[in-house]
Image (cartoon, helix red, strand yellow):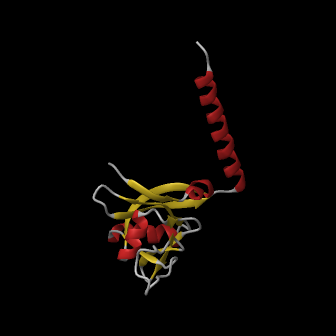
Amino acid sequence: MAINIIAQNKKAKHDYEILEKFEAGIVLSGAEVKALRAKRANLQDSYCRFIKGELFLMNAHIAHLETASKHFTPDTRAPRKLLLRKKELEKLYVKVHKEGLTIVPLMLYFNERNLAKASIAIAKGKKLHDKRADLKEKTLEREASQAIKNRSY
């Protein structure tokens, strides 16, 4: 499975505990697709929200290309509709509204069929001590791998 990653939300894995991942299509205009191919997107501070029973990607920045139409410049942070199956939408809706979980975008990418997709996840917010424990664990793993790598035979 060869995917072309456009943008990642690295802060999501730091701030949230990822419970379940989903793949969603995105409704985009032609100029936005061109911008994504040029990797002109940013998922920092973006989130997903239900509006009238449909899921939208909010606050994701997709820059306007200079080569696109100069007469019409779209809103770079406009809400973009996410396309999921009905059962997946219902499952997400229940998790968000009844269990109090959050839906966070993890990355934007083009799949093997060259379709723009968003990887989203149901997540639970981490407490400060959880974040510190994760950082400590990563540091220990990195030091252990460095020690193994630098070990002389």
Q: Nearer the viewer, residue 98 or 5?
A: 5
Q: Tally the marks.
A: 0
Residue 87 in picture, x, y percent from top left: 34, 68
Looking at the image, residue 78 sits to the left or right of residue 150; the answer is: left
Looking at the image, residue 136 sits to the left or right of residue 120; the answer is: right
Residue 105 makes an appearance in the image = yes
Looking at the image, residue 70 sits to the left or right of residue 25; the answer is: right
In the image, farthest residue toward the top: 153
Residue 43 in picture, x, y percent from top left: 53, 65
Q: Quadrant of the C terminus?
A: top right
Q: Nearer the viewer, residue 41 or 20?
A: 41
Is 77 placed above or below 124 here?
Answer: below
Q: For residue 68, what is the image quadrant?
A: bottom left
In the image, farthest residue toward the bottom: 71
Q: For residue 81, what is the image quadrant?
A: bottom left
Looking at the image, residue 26 sits to the left or right of residue 151; the answer is: left
Is 143 placed above or below 105 here?
Answer: above
Q: Residue at x 57, y 58 (%)?
A: 12
Q: Residue at x 45, y 72 (%)?
A: 93
Q: Nearer the viewer, residue 77 or 15?
A: 77
Residue 28 makes an appearance in the image = no
Residue 21 in picture, x, y percent from top left: 44, 57
Residue 148 in picture, x, y percent from top left: 59, 24
Q: Residue at x 67, y 51 (%)?
A: 131
